[in-house]
Image: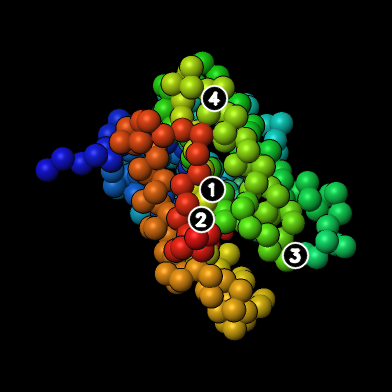
Amino acid sequence: MKNIIDLNNKTILVTGASDGIGKQTSKLVSELGGRVILVGRNEEKLSNTLSELVGEGHAAYAFDLKQLDRIDLFIADIVKAHGALDGLVHCAGESQVRPLKMCSPDFMKDIFDINYFAFVELVRAYSKKKNNNGGSIVVMSSVGSKSGDKGKIAYTSSKAAVDGAVRTLAKELAEKNIRVNSVVAGMIKTGIYDRYIEKNGEEAMKNNVLSRQYLGVGEVDDVSNAIVYLLSNAAKFITGTGMVVDGGRLS
Ligand SMILES: NC(=O)c1ccc[n+]([C@@H]2O[C@H](COP(=O)([O-])OP(=O)(O)OC[C@H]3O[C@@H](n4cnc5c(N)ncnc54)[C@H](OP(=O)(O)O)[C@@H]3O)[C@@H](O)[C@H]2O)c1
């Protein structure tokens, strides 16, 4: 049987691999034959992910991606140890709800550091000649990049910045045979969902999210399936865009 999403002999770096969408993506990449380099902060959770991968040659690195000025060296060390990369998935991210009056520049920058600046710095390092074999870059965006949400100026604007960067990076990196896309996700059942329910309750979820997201809450594999498609050669003509995976929320 033909498998159009074949990641055999591909080395894919996944950030946010210790939890949620990044964890599921790492597992799926390994099931499709890829070698996965896991990145997150929590060593125990990274080891858990590592133990759930199939195949061989995977590795895990505990690293805080807010250390922006260390990312370049971090990627160089990974390439030295594992060879040039074929793909990068940036799932590490943070979402916090704060009204405008509490959004100091430091708070805004903190959210942008992981959601946006770390992404751009990872791409800058990935795209250096010796660090890649061409390949595909996928970053997590959100429906929040296209529709506002009270109390989420830092998050929604960081994701809008990500989508803006994707369009430009795709143009700039096409000549290096590197594609760049985002996945624009609706509400997915991960820690982010659990924390929302804990803070706002089931009723708020129903009224504010599920009234618009009429296929219900998404599962992590709804997103990881889209990510591995974009990573694969089956998506070789797709770059500079955002794939919407949102249960109909933006329709
Ligand atoms: N879940 C949703 O409903 C939803 C919807 C739209 C978009 N998204 C986006 O999808 C991405 C993944 O979300 P998720 O729901 O899977 O989140 P999650 O379950 O909370 O996982 C977040 C991941 O990011 C890592 N991370 C956070 N800060 C980091 C840092 N400074 N350095 C390194 N790693 C860091 C965490 O690692 P440690 O725990 O090891 O620190 C964890 O592995 C995020 O960008 C999020 O904005 C999610």
Name the amino acid type tagged 2: Ala
For the residue pair 216 and 110, the one nearer the viewer reads as: 216
The N terminus, quarter of image? top left
For the residues bearing labels 1 and 2, Cβ distance under 8 angstroms:
yes
For the residues bearing labels 2 and 3, Cβ distance under 8 angstroms:
no
Relative vertical location of residue 151 with respect to residue 231 in this rendering, above or below: below
Cα distance between the residues tagged 4 and 1: 19 Å
Which residue in the structure is indicated by mark 1? 140
Q: In the image, what residue occupies the spot 37% across and 44% down? A: 228
Q: How crowded is mark 3: few (under 14 residues within 10 Å), some or many (20 or more)?
A: some
Q: Is residue 101 left or right of residue 242?
A: right
Name the amino acid type tagged 1: Met
Is the residue at mark 1 in contact range of ligand 1, meaning its CB lies under 8 Å from it? yes
Q: In the image, what residue occupies the spot 39% across and 58% down? A: 222
Residue 185: x and y, percent? 51, 55
One can see residue 90 in this view: yes
Is the residue at mark 2 in contact range of ligand 1, meaning its CB lies under 8 Å from it? yes
